[in-house]
Amino acid sequence: MTMRAYRKAAICAALLAGTMMTPAFAQTKTITGGFDVGPGGLQGNFNPMTAPAGYTWLSTYFAPLVTYDAGLTKLVPALATSWEISADKLSYAFKLAEETWHDGLKFTAADVKFTIELNKNPKAASLLSARLAAVDSVEVKDPRTVVVKLSRPDNALIVSLTKMMILPAHALAGIAPEDMAKNAMWSTKPIGTGPFKFVRYETDRFVELAANETYRGGKPKVDRLINRYFANAATAISALRAGEIQFTYVESDDVPTFKGNKDYTIIEGASYVANYIGFNNQVPLWSDIRVRQAVMHAIDRNAIIDSLYKGAAKKADCGYVEGSLIPKSLDEYAYDPAKATRLLKEAGWDKINGTKPISWITYYNNPLTANVMAAIQSMLAQVGINVVPRALDAAGYNGIVMSRTSNPADFPLVYAGLQNGPDPGTLNLGLNESQIPPVGQNFLQIRIPELNAALDAAVAETDQAKATTKYQDVCAVMNKTLPWGTMWVANRYGVASVKLRDFAWTPAPGGGPFAAAPEKWSIVP
Amino acid sequence: MADVPTAASAFPLAGLSRSPLQRALGRFFRNGAAIAGLLILVPVLLAVLTYPLWWRYAPNSIDLRALNSGPTAVHWLGTDGVGRDTLARLLQGGRISLLIASVSVAISLFVGFVVGALAAFGGRAVDSMVMRFVDLAMTLPPVILLLVLASITGTGILPTIFVISLLSWPVLSRMVRARLLELRERDFVVASRAFGAGLGHLLFRHALPNSLDILVVYASLQFANAILLEAGLSFLGMGIVPPEASWGNMLRAARSTVVLELHPMQWMPAGAALVATVLAINFIGDGLRDAFDPRTDLE
Amino acid sequence: MLGFYLKRLAAGLMMLIALSIMVFVLLRLAPGDPVDAYLNPLAPLSQAEMEALRQRLGLDQPWLVQYLAWLRAALGGDLGYSIDRAGVRVLPLLMERTGPTLLLMLTGLAMAIVLGIAAGVVGAVKRNSAIDVGLGVLAFLAISTPAFLNALLGLYVFAVVLRWAPSGGMLTPGAPFSLSDLLTHLILPASLLAIVYSALFMRYMRSSMIEVLNQDYLRTARAKGVDEFTVIVRHALRNAVLPVVTLIGSTIGVAIGGAIFIESVFDWPGMGLLMVKAVETRDYPVIMGATLLVGIGVILVNLLTDLAYGLVDPRIQVN
């Protein structure tokens, strides 16, 4: 044979050998899922300090001091085995677990002190820095005990701590806080204490974790965990149905595909996000309360819940739907277009706006919300309010609503959601006059003194039983004064393959965190 | 040569002398595929333009009690996820798609012709400058342009027309310029210029009639292209967004496996209408191209 | 000739600068900047924190300053860092994504060339037969169906229902690289991409082939006793393929931008998806870099095409 022929044969042989190589990883147990699909996830964010969402995945390799249980009802220990709050509420003592970092060094109280101080530092751009404002100092009593001292009582502190992932002082002390936010280290070699440790991140494609064999909760039952990124929920569902992943968040519209299919389990849970129509207080359109009442009466919320949400949502007449937080006599704002028209006439709607189009923006980009907004648009049109829905991407929405140069005329009406649980105090951020930017998130600039008082009282209340009553007051005031047109709290869904065993997941806002016990997850072939 | 039939002797002269336009039309109407195309397109146009007169549902009327219904006696093609009648949306979507396509074709025809002609007849310096400008328009990455424009202007009919025209005219200007460059060297044009003919005269008396075939063929193909482009844009979430109807955004619903599998009537009619219309236009365009080419008769 | 090339190169450079200015301005006009994109409406930063971040990214400076800084770096080959992906440099990111896009496009094109030319030849040789008409109809259908519809249906039928191919992505996540893995992921999107192109090539090939088949020199070859197969393949095909080659050349120019629909439906990690994500997150450096890259590609292709015009028809003095 000639040289040319030899070369050809060699190339052919190499190609053949290449195609015949079977991936050796087939022997290892791997769970693959779309853990960051949906509103609770955040693809591409690896810094737990700047993460508004994505906690489900972050909790597999990081851990906070305390977390919620899988039902999101109570706080349970995580890296803190127990904690004691002093009588004057100014001192929190945490006893810490025995654990080693993924690089072998021991986890100690010094790491907790480091983490709290880093989060408080404004240069680190942590989302928690405002929530840790009450912390005055952190003391390391011994390697297994840390005491956090406050300058004033703060009931929300323990809840804020659930979102604070503990970071290793020895690995991060050398990085300047202002370099933390977008540091490459987070996506290349982060070190945590969770049941899995970081292996690698293939840009925009997936994140791979390997089992942490020395985890204090026991060696994980699977060897690897892979979080696959998807451009949208639809591609994730295709992958789930094709058997390539074992779990993903699923839009409620897509759940019917899986109903009755014995290969999949549908997981349903409350979203803890109250959806509302936000009236921008800075434009004169909505100043008259009769106009806002008219909007509430014009919308047939029950019909929308029954038909579009297929019953999987709870009507909200204030910011809460949790039974214990609802007072006895609430105005249900029943569907009554005649009453709405009358109220608008009394308020002089024709002179306020008439049928001029009103821009109604949102950051929700899924088909369900598009349908919901179309339904509401049609209902409002029947009473003479002409809204024009417009879905923007996150950057566009934030640019219009939150920018310091934002023009109120650009967002006279919004459709948004705000977390209302498990800690009911979260609503304070969006409703209290004291939270108007630049301090907080009250972008609609709601200024209702009665509401401010109710919120302040509820948030400051330390006694659990009294707090519940105070929140009922908040609900009553919201219902009466209508800062928002509260709509509903919808359920959210995840679908898991039946091959997964002991898999815990709940559609928590922001992904949690909650005690999902990833070390117990297993997969049958 | 007497033995070889020439075009002249193939057609007896007496009483059958027709203008080039008439001959072209004749060729067009002898083309089976082109006729088929017309037979598809004309009814579609009629249906789409007149539907409010004979169909009782409006494309945006919501009926929450009749969601996702299959074809029934009242809703011939069923309803979508918010209870809107699919047939009404199909016809309205056709209106929007065809409107966008025709306006953007008209704009890009005008701009493309003028720019190409300017480049060809304006002299070397003008040619250089204009062609660099055309290159600039062609190098704009369409994806980036579309996405950024969508976020600035929002979605809707006008931005979509604007974007589609912007993307299409450079190609035509290059073709027109190539044809006119060739034309420029022909004797009658050289003569015309020697007599002092101005740019306007050259453009409308010589350039336009002689590029008519390019323009007609381009218009028909670009029309089909524009419909597909609008559908693609709406599919990606730009272009026309609900509650406005368009064939592209009706197909976007099929991204959800539920709609794809369980509610085929919500997207299949739009897909079928899209393919049929574009097919018809392609047949017609092909027929036009053959019609303008005298060599077709020799086959 | 050298003067001509230099002039075109200089013009090309001017154009890239003009392009970058246009995109720069457009981006600043769009609502929201990278910091806005980074926020979650449910848990935004305080305005002070946002300002600090903007300062770190240099976004609070006047537009001219920002642009000149970018330009100076770009001329030196430094396209900066991606804002959205921490610590990732733009140029390697673009290179990383150009590969998959080119792989997809070129594979699709290769399949289309083989299929299109073969079908075109068959159609021309067996003119007006059942095969020819059948192929013609298929070709028309192919170019009349939008790419995304093909992609959606193809994905559903072949990946979800039949499970013959994976439902997306380029490689199985977590698995070590293997050629067979890549090929199984590549074949479905590339085939769907090939559908439209093969129809186009087929039509041009067929009409070109018909013209060539009628030429005198072929009649001579047949009269000399050359067998039909050789006549078709060695003589006719060679000459008929020229216009198709020009067509192929211009389609490659489009290749760099990425087949956005196919990439979107199949989650293919190429330039198309990168640009969509970059605009969503207002990742200015990536968008500017991608614009530059695509711009360079298109300018090069245009230059080559213009040269080809001049070569083919000597009457056209390109300059």
Image (cartoon, coloured by chain):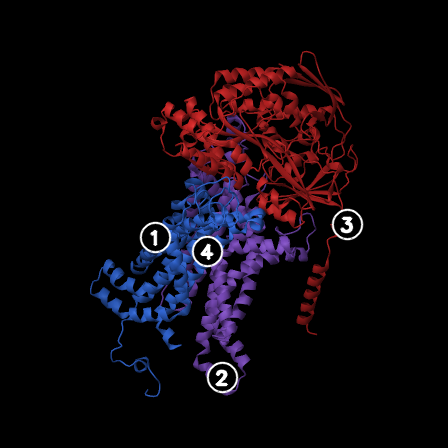
Residue highlighted by disc 4: B273
Q: How busy is the neighbourhood of tag 4: few (under 14 within 10 Å), some, or many (20 plus)?
A: some
* Residue C221, label in figure: 2
Mark nearest the camera among 4 and 3 is 4
**Callouts 1 and 4 close, C-beta under 8 Å:** no
**What colour has chain A?**
red
Res C64 → quadrant: top left
Who comes first in sequence, dot 1 or dot 4?
1
Find disc 1 in the rendering and name its residue. B107
> What whole-number distance in Å separates the C-alpha atoms at marks 4 and 3?
50 Å
Secondary structure beneath label 3: helix
The residue carrying pointer 1 sits among few (fewer than 14), some (14 to 19) or many (20 or more) residues within 10 Å by Cα, namely some
- The purple chain is C
Discs 2, 1 touching: Cβ within 8 Å: no
Chain identifier, blue in the render: B
Question: Mark 2 packing: few (<14 Cα in 10 Å), some, or many (20+)?
Answer: some
Q: What residue is drawn where x is 70% and y is 63%?
A: A16
Above or below, A433 relative to B3: above
What kind of residue is marked 4? Ala
Q: CA distance from mark 1 to mark 3?
A: 61 Å
Q: Nearer the viewer, residue A53 or B115?
A: A53
Q: Chain of mark 2?
A: C
Q: Quick check: marks 4 and 3 in contact, CB under 8 Å?
A: no
Give the residue at x 60% y 21%: A325
Does label 3 lie on the same chain as label 1? no
The amino acid at mark 1 is: Ile
Q: Which element is circle 2 on?
A: helix
Q: Residue furthest front?
A: B73
Quadrant of residue A288 in the image? top left
In whole angstroms, how far apart are the C-alphas of marks 4 and 2? 49 Å
